[in-house]
Image (cartoon, rainbow, N blue to C red):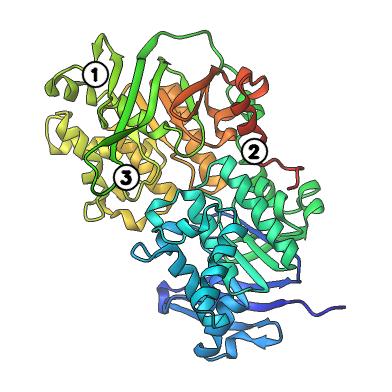
Amino acid sequence: MLKPLLDVKNLSVRFGQGEGSFLALDGFELTVAKGETVVLVGESGSGKSISALSISRLLPSTAIIESGSIEFAGNDLLGLPEKGMRNVRGAGIGMVFQEPQSSLNPVMTIGSQIGESLKRHHGLYGKALLERIEELLVLVGISNPKHRCRQYPHEFSGGMKQRVMIAIALAGDPDLLIADEPTTALDVTIQAQVLSLMKTIQTNKNMGMIFITHDLAVAYQVADRIIVMKEGKIIEAADREDFYRTPSHEYTRKLFDSIPSWEKRLSEHPSADRPTAEKTLNVKNLSVSFLGKTSLFSRRSNSMVAVDNVDLELQEGRTLALVGESGSGKTTMAKAILQLIKPSYGSVYYRGDNLCDVSGHQLRRHRGDLQMVFQDPYSSMNPRMLIGAIIKEGMIAQKIGIDESERDDRVRRLLLQVGLEPSYALRYPHEFSGGQRQRICIARALAVEPKVLICDEPTSALDVSVQAQILHLLRGLQEELGLTYLFVTHNIGVVAYLAHQVAVMHQGQIVEYGSVDDVLHRPQHIYTRTLLNAVPKIGMSL
């Protein structure tokens, strides 16, 4: 039997000391052969990323490796000095991180960042360096490489930044690629492109790959073997087909049960498709344009149309899902409806008022009825404020509650309503998980007794079980309070589970509009069909 490229045995990693310490990895074991893809799945906090950081020797200083061994290409990585490990990183092991925006240096050109690894591991300079940078950009599907390598990260879309991260990881010509949630925040079409790219490169180079994800459909597309982790332990490991055919562990079956779907929606909410309700918000001919200069020294301005003559209707107590690729105009339109961005023209009618024309005082009067839940709950909360104070902000602005005591009571009730302990009001945002933070943001929105909630990708960065909890919560709140939702998402499973109607957005326009059943099962527009075909499905390989 051939020796594996990577062999991890009995690895245990502890964070902290004394009573507050905990095992982040407990007896973790993993082998990866050349050309093989092993996928790690599990909830946030299960130890998936810690295992990747351990293999790369990038653990924070608070982590202690208590036991185990990591052997890579015949080298004992735990016994290597840091200088030797720096040679392994890049040349032996490449890593693609979850969030390219935080991994790329904003003041360095893309070419310079790719070139760093080429200089270190291959000694390339001058013309040879530039040629290899351009070759790598072409390899990851970025056209016009001569121009692109001189640009900065902010000039790239999310999907293109992720391609750049793959190019950086490949620059050292590694034998093993570790990809930590590389497609989590990407829309389905870009995700499909990135996954196909990674699989093609892996096959051509015969690389081993560790792929970390919480999306079981994505896992099916790329995996040879799958490992399920929970609380730092491996609880199930199997070849791909066996894993999906007969998952053996109860926790694994729970992960499968958490996947949102049309069938789950009908079984859990059989009365979801009631007759058409009254209109609560009406959008007419809404357009948003952004001005930009043609060059640094030009006085001429050109405009970019982000939202182009859009009509929408939100029906009372129902959910309209807004889907489309990144850059299609979804978030811009959501903000324009709330007047957080001023539309170029058009109307947004609510309770007889055109929100585009009303005075500031009238608009503030409607703010309590129209609330937004943002994609990133952490960045939308003040890290220096207690949770209770964050939730109370809107109450104070809308003059809800006669005194501080009444508002405190309402905060406690709201926290219970979203499934959190009332005592959490005395904690800070950094003390909570991503799913808990999103619940807090929902509580904050509910604090002013809204009628309409606009939710902008509120579950995109959550693992499947936490996502299921948030969706179930939103569904329950809608039935209890009669809330109306505009739900911006690129997750078709979420649409099937939560929405009543769907609007498909492409290049600032609505190209298809109808019931969930019609749009998902009988799409008419070619873009909608392309979007649906890009959705990863269990049973469908790349």
Dot 2 amino acid type: Ala
221 or 156, which lies in front?
156
> Disc 1 and disc 2: Cα gap in Å?
37 Å
> Disc 1 and disc 3: Cα gap in Å?
36 Å
Task: Using the image, determine if residue 244 lies above or below residue 321.
Answer: below
Which dot marks residue 422?
A: 3
Q: Callout 3 environment at 10 Å: few (<14), some (14 to 19), or many (20+)?
A: some
The residue that mark 1 highlights is 355
Dot 3 amino acid type: Pro
298 or 468, which lies in front?
298
Dot 1 amino acid type: Leu
The residue that mark 2 highlights is 534
Which dot marks residue 285?
A: none
Q: Secondary structure at mark 2?
A: loop
Q: Earlier in the sequence, mark 1 or mark 3?
A: 1
Percent x, y of residue 175:
68, 74
205 or 313, which lies in front?
205
343 or 50, which lies in front?
343
